[in-house]
Image (cartoon, coloured by chain):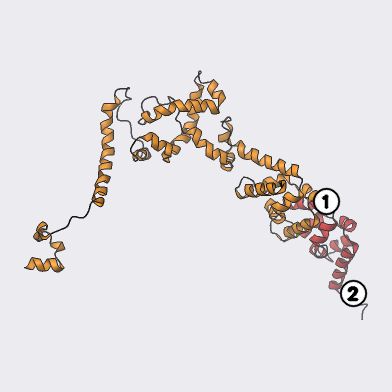
Amino acid sequence: MLESGLEHKIFAPSDVLAHATPDVLANHLPPELLSKVLASSLAAGAMTPERVLETVTPMEMSKHVPHEVLWACIAAAAARAGVTTAGKS
Amino acid sequence: MSITLFFVDAFTSALERGIATPDALIRHITPDVLAAHLPRTLWARLLTACLGAARVDASTIVDTVGVRNLCEHLPKPLLWGCLADLAATALGGARPSTPAASPASPTKATTSFAAAASAPETLLPPPPMAKPAGTAPGAAHAESTGTHSVITSATNPSAAGAADSGSIFDAARTRTPTRPPARGLGTSRSLSAAGASSRRPQVPATPPTPPPGPTPAAGVPAPARPPARRDDLDFEVETDIHTDWKDKEPIPVTDEMVDWPSAEETANGDALDRLKR
């Protein structure tokens, strides 16, 4: 779902990192991934949400980040798109 | 004993003085090391800072995590290896035993305090017999040529061993381009070697003048000196007049001492009234 939402631009990498905050990533990603994120940012000279998600792929996210967090990201994107209000009326 | 505080002081001082750079630290403190040893709270801080920063580099990491946190959490052998590497880099530029390497690496000379402190010391003495008797300050250099050979042999054993074959002169000649500016700066050693007059070191600062005559032998300099010294004397006499004039007490001026008709410019006020009478 996360990969599909990014692919179809339902949400952007910045939306993902708005939920999977640095605090969440630091507390749940394994050291190897943290090292990769920092190393790629050092090599590129900047750390952007896009670059973080290139290193920490949606598959890795789903493996390590709590699913509640990822679901909140997807639900927020759905709310922005207006698809969650139809059933409530 | 707190080895952590020692490392904190050492790295902080090295960073402040430019001996260490964040890049040099991150060569040892790699992202892998940080990932393995930094607590997750510091990683959260680091990721937040990196995502908010326009540019991510080694200084971003060092500034965000902080030297104290790095020294507290990273393995001490790793920190020591980093410190030893910094010291080796800093001290490596000061080694006089490798003359070919020091001019080829200017960065070492700029980062090394030891190099800055010791290089003038070893370069001060002039090369022995590079210009045997023709130079003007030959008397001052005659004393130091002896010490030069001692210093050279002490700092460069290979040069000392080659002294008989004459290659020591070649080694000394390679240093001569850096020596004249050191003497031109008026170091205490050059001043004391110049002689009794404190103005003598200013003379070499002027464009080099040709020697007054052909290279004199040991007994000839006495007659050859006066023309060269006359310039110095003129210069000093001129300044002495000024100082004498300033130091003397003012002479009281009486009416008898003033030739009023010839000094019309000063005839004003009371003096003008006296003139009218």
Residue B211, horizontal then vertical, whole percent: 32, 30
Q: How much space separates mark 1 and mark 2, taking CA atoms?
A: 37 Å
Residue B164, horizontal then vertical, whole percent: 50, 18
Instruction: Determine if residue B114 is in view.
Output: yes
Q: Viewed as shown, does residue B189 lie left or right of B43?
A: left
State which chain disc 2 sits on: A
| Tag 1 and tag 2 share a subunit | yes
- The amino acid beneath tag 1 is Pro
Q: Colour of chain A?
A: red
Instruction: Determine if residue A43 is in view.
Output: no
Residue at image mark 1: A31
Q: Residues within 10 Å of mark 2 (few under 14, many from 20)?
A: few
Q: Viewed as shown, does residue A50 lie left or right of B201?
A: right
Residue B69, horizontal then vertical, whole percent: 73, 53
State which chain disc 1 sits on: A
Q: Nearer the viewer, residue B230 or B192?
A: B192
Decide: is B113 above or below A14: above
Decide: is B97 above or below A28: above
Are discs 1 and 2 less than 8 Å apart at CB? no
Q: Residue at x 28, y 30 (%)?
A: B225
Q: Secondary structure at mark 2?
A: loop
Q: Which chain is orange?
A: B
Q: Viewed as shown, does residue A17 lie left or right of B89?
A: right
* Label number found at residue A4: none
* Label number found at residue A84: 2
- The amino acid beneath tag 2 is Thr
